[in-house]
C-alpha cells in the first residue's frame, strides 16, 4: 500500500521545488561584503508599469510595451527594483517583470553589424538606432549580438546596456 510513502515524498518534493525555484537560482550581484551591486536586466513582458516608488500604491510614470528592453537595476526594496531605462528615466518595477537575459539597445546612429569584431570585416546588416538586440558576448571594443535574424558584431560604443569596460564570455 502506497499511503505510507506519500507523507515523505510530498515534503521532499516541496523542499526540492524551493531549492530550484527561479528566485533562489538567480541571486542578485553583490560585492564581497554582501552589498547590492547594480546590474543589467531586461523586461520580461510586453507591458511593464514603472512607478514613482516601490509599491502599487505609488503612481505609474511610464507603461512600457517593449519586451526585452534593457534596463539597469540600481536599487532594491523587497520585491521591487529601481531601474534606469535607455532614455535615462528612473522608476520602480516589480522584480517578476525583469528577466536576467541581457539585451542592449543601439543609440545615436545607424551602425554596421559586422561578421567579425573588426572595422574591416564584412557588413552583415545596417542596424538603426533604437533596435533591441540579444547580447551574447563582448570583448574590449565589440559585442556579439542577435539583431532580428542576424548575428554579428557591433561596436560597444553604439550600445546601451553594457559597460565600456565590461567583458562577457
Image (spheres, rainbow, N blue to C red):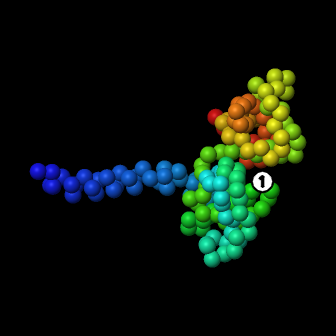
Q: Residue furthest right?
A: 109
User: Does 23 sit left or right of 32 as displayed?
Assistant: left
Residue 157 location, x and y as percent?
Answer: 82, 41
Q: Does any portion of residue 18 appear in the rendered image?
A: yes
> Residue at position x 64%, y 63% from top?
93
Q: Residue at x 66, y 60 (%)?
A: 48
**Secondary structure type for disc 1:** loop
* Residue at image point 60% right, 49% down: 100
Where 99 sits versus 135, above or below? below
Q: Is residue 142 above or below residue 47?
A: above
Left or right, residue 121 beside residue 54: right
Left or right: 13 with respect to 126?
left
Is residue 158 positioned above or below 70 on the image? above
Quarter residue 125 falls in: top right
**Could you tell me residue 68's position as x and y percent?**
67, 49
- The residue tagged 1 is 86
Task: Please indicate whether residue 15 sits to the left or right of residue 59 in the image.
Answer: left
Q: Where's residue 153, x and y in %?
A: 75, 31
Which of 45/137 is in front? 45
Amino acid at each position: 500500500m502506497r499511503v505510507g510513502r506519500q507523507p515523505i515524498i510530498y515534503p521532499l518534493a516541496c523542499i526540492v521545488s524551493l531549492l530550484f525555484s527561479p528566485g533562489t537560482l538567480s541571486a542578485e550581484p553583490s560585492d564581497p561584503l554582501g552589498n547590492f551591486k547594480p546590474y543589467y536586466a531586461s523586461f520580461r513582458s510586453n507591458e511593464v508599469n514603472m512607478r514613482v516608488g516601490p509599491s502599487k500604491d505609488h503612481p505609474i510614470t511610464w507603461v512600457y510595451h517593449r519586451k526585452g528592453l534593457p534596463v539597469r537595476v540600481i536599487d532594491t526594496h523587497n520585491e521591487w527594483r529601481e531601474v534606469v531605462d535607455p532614455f535615462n528615466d528612473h522608476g520602480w518595477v516589480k522584480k517578476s517583470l525583469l528577466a536576467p537575459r541581457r539585451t542592449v539597445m543601439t543609440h545615436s546612429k545607424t551602425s554596421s553589424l559586422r561578421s567579425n569584431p573588426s572595422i574591416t570585416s564584412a557588413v552583415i546588416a545596417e542596424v538603426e538606432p533604437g533596435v533591441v538586440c540579444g547580447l551574447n558576448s563582448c570583448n574590449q571594443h565589440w559585442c556579439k549580438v542577435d539583431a532580428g535574424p542576424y548575428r554579428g558584431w557591433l561596436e560597444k560604443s553604439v550600445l546601451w546596456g553594457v559597460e565600456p569596460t565590461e567583458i562577457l564570455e
